[in-house]
Image (cartoon, rainbow, N blue to C red):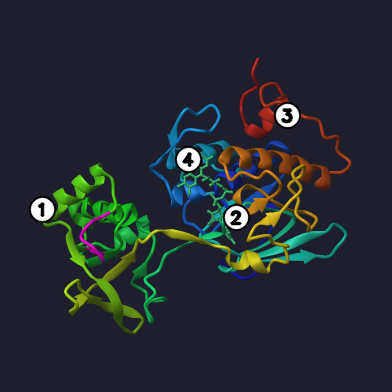
Amino acid sequence: MHAAHMIHTDVVVIGAGPVGLFQVFQLGLLGIDAHVVDVLPEAGGQCIALYPDKPIYDVPGIPHCTGRELASLLLKQASPFLGIDTLNQDSPRLHLGHQVESVTPRAGIEPGFTLTTHQQLTFNCKAVMVAAGAGAFVPRTLNLPGLEGASNLHYHLDDDLLARLAGQHVVISGGGEEAVGAAIELASMGAAHKAARITLLHRRDQFQVDADLAERLNALIQAGDIEVTVGMPTDCHRADGVIHSLALLTPDSTTVDLPLDHLLVRQGMSPKLGPLANWGLPLERKQVPVSSATFESDVPRIFAVGDINTYPGKKRLLLCGFHEATLAAHAASTILRPDTPQHLLYTTTSPLLHERLGVKRSS
Ligand SMILES: Cc1cc2nc3c(=O)[nH]c(=O)nc-3n(C[C@H](O)[C@H](O)[C@H](O)COP(=O)(O)OP(=O)(O)OC[C@H]3O[C@@H](n4cnc5c(N)ncnc54)[C@H](O)[C@@H]3O)c2cc1C
């Protein structure tokens, strides 16, 4: 994206986790234009990054669903306001893979903010909704000097990468679902797209996966489609920006060399407060104090919803985040449109809301 690319909108929602997605929906119902930004390549926040296949039982009206299913439903619900009809997450208003770096107040007739991402996207907006959870999700790294920035080091297994791995020796580092799932996905590719060799690298020969995944992994190991190497990476051999091998300390305390074409690190994600700490927002134990009536922070026009905020009685639950997003949208509407009457409308009966949702009017 070119540095000069500037997006003008009413509101920027920072974080496309469950609460950020519902925030977009609530703003959309009120006719407020919003863009949403997330550093992850996929929308859904913790639901996708931490528990995609685990069940959730306490979302009202949904007896149970997995993290991935909830993220998908929330994305579908917000899609009329994201400019997407399908769930391919390709939307002009959903900016994935972008970390918001700075939030700077902007002087002018109407106050607002300029936001920049580290991939050089810039937004001009009138209000900001921080739905940043515990911070930006970043992959856990191997912590080896010289590793970062190599052209064959990867953390996400997307379609582009899958295409590049055909015929290559791919080393996948990690011992949980993310690493084992990636190895199985890679090993299950059709002949034309298959990697030449897949090595699962873990410090132990036990993997922390459920019985189904363990069975599939064992079958692929038996078939010779996946190899397992036990060892702790201690160094890497890198030349011309490419990692050629990892030095491993094995359980019998010898050091061996593991050559590779591509290294995929799948050791889970951890949230980092990161740039949020520099946006001038007062923080209390890494959370943003807000009014429990409006969810506005101490900085006018910056709201905080979901796990990132704190107020008396706060509970870090999805249901609470959805409530907060609803009230924050109404509070923002009052600020952004002071001259417009703020009537409460029902999605069941309001023709205006049906029009905004793009649904046919009910009888
Ligand atoms: C294992 C587990 C199980 C859970 N089970 C339940 C349950 O059963 N019921 C329940 O109600 N709750 C449950 N929760 C809690 C629930 O997942 C959280 O309350 C919810 O995810 C909070 O949503 P959020 O949108 O506020 O934050 P998150 O889900 O954390 O999303 C925040 C998003 O913001 C992004 N972000 C942050 N900073 C930036 C930045 N600077 N730039 C760009 N993007 C940024 C992050 O990458 C992330 O995607 C569970 C949590 C865990 C960990």
In the image, what residue type sits under mark 2? Ala
Q: Name the residue at 22% across, 67% down.
A: 168
Q: CA distance from mark 2 to mark 4?
A: 18 Å
Q: Name the residue at 45% across, 48% down.
A: 48
Mark 2: secondary structure: loop
Above or below, 141 relative to 301: below
Residue 118: x and y in percent read: 57, 69
The stretch of residues the image draws in magenta is 200-207
Q: Is residue 43 visible?
A: no
Q: Residues within 10 Å of mark 1 (few under 14, many from 20)?
A: few
Tell me if the residue at label 2 has its CB under 8 Å from ligand 1.
Answer: yes
Task: Tell whether label 4 touches label 2 (CB within 8 Å).
Answer: no
In the image, what residue type sits under mark 3? Leu
Q: Earlier in the sequence, mark 4 or mark 1?
A: 4
Which corner quadrant of the image does residue 114 belong to?
A: bottom right
Quarter of the rendering occupied by the N terminus = bottom right
**Which residue is identified by label 2?**
132
**Which residue is identified by label 3?**
352
Q: Is residue 203 magenta?
A: yes
Q: Earlier in the sequence, mark 2 or mark 1?
A: 2
Q: Name the residue at 31% across, 55% down.
A: 176
Q: CA distance from mark 3 to mark 4?
A: 25 Å
**Which residue is identified by label 4?**
72
In the image, what residue type sits under mark 4? Ser
